[in-house]
Amino acid sequence: MTDRLLSEVEARLDDLISLCDRLEQENATLRAKETNWQQERTRLTEKNELARNRVETMINRLKNIEAES
């Protein structure tokens, strides 16, 4: 291999290594964000379920009051 060709291959390898490092960091960031979104989704689902139960309880109370009248 000529020195020029060897230098080009080394430069390309350096670029690929840099790209791999950047992609690994980006992947780690995305995985952390995914975990946060999953936790937020779970929290919101629980809040929604609690609200639904409260509304159902209020509706049943109103029906009972109406039935007693």
Image (spheres, rainbow, N blue to C red):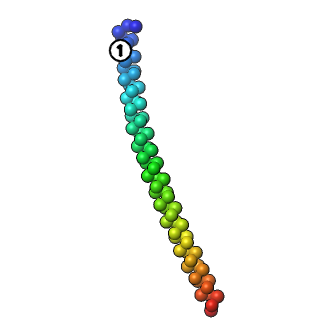
Label 1 crowding class (10 Å Cα cut-off): few <14, some 14-19, many 20+?
Answer: few
Considering the numbered disc 1 on the image, is that residue within a helix, a strand or a loop? helix
Residue 58 lies, in percent from the top left, at 55, 79
Relative to residue 41, is residue 69 drawn left or right?
right
59 in relation to 14, above or below: below
In this view, the residue farthest toward the bottom is 69
Q: Is residue 47 above or below residue 11?
A: below
Q: Residue at x 40, y 43 (%)?
A: 29
Residue 8 point in image, percent of width and height: 38, 16
**Residue 51: x, y in percent?**
52, 70
The number of discs equals 1
- For the point 37% across and 29% down, which residue is it? 18
Q: Please state if 69 lies on the left or on the right of 38 as rendered.
A: right
Quarter that holds the C terminus? bottom right
Amino acid found under the numbered disc labelled 1: Ser
Q: Nearer the viewer, residue 22 or 49?
A: 49
- In the rendered view, tell whether residue 61 sits above or below residue 46: below
Judging depth in this view, the residue of 9 and 36 nearest the camera is 36
Name, please, the residue furthest toward the top: 2
Q: Quadrant of residue 52?
A: bottom right
The quadrant holding residue 19 is top left
Q: Where residue 26 appears, x then y in whole percent?
A: 41, 39
Q: Which residue is mark 1?
A: 7
Residue in the image at 40% along x and 7% along y: 1
The single residue placed furthest to the right in the displayed view is: 67
Q: Is 52 above or below relative to 19?
A: below
Query: Residue placed at 54% from the left, 66% from the top?
Result: 49
Residue 58 falls left or right of residue 30: right
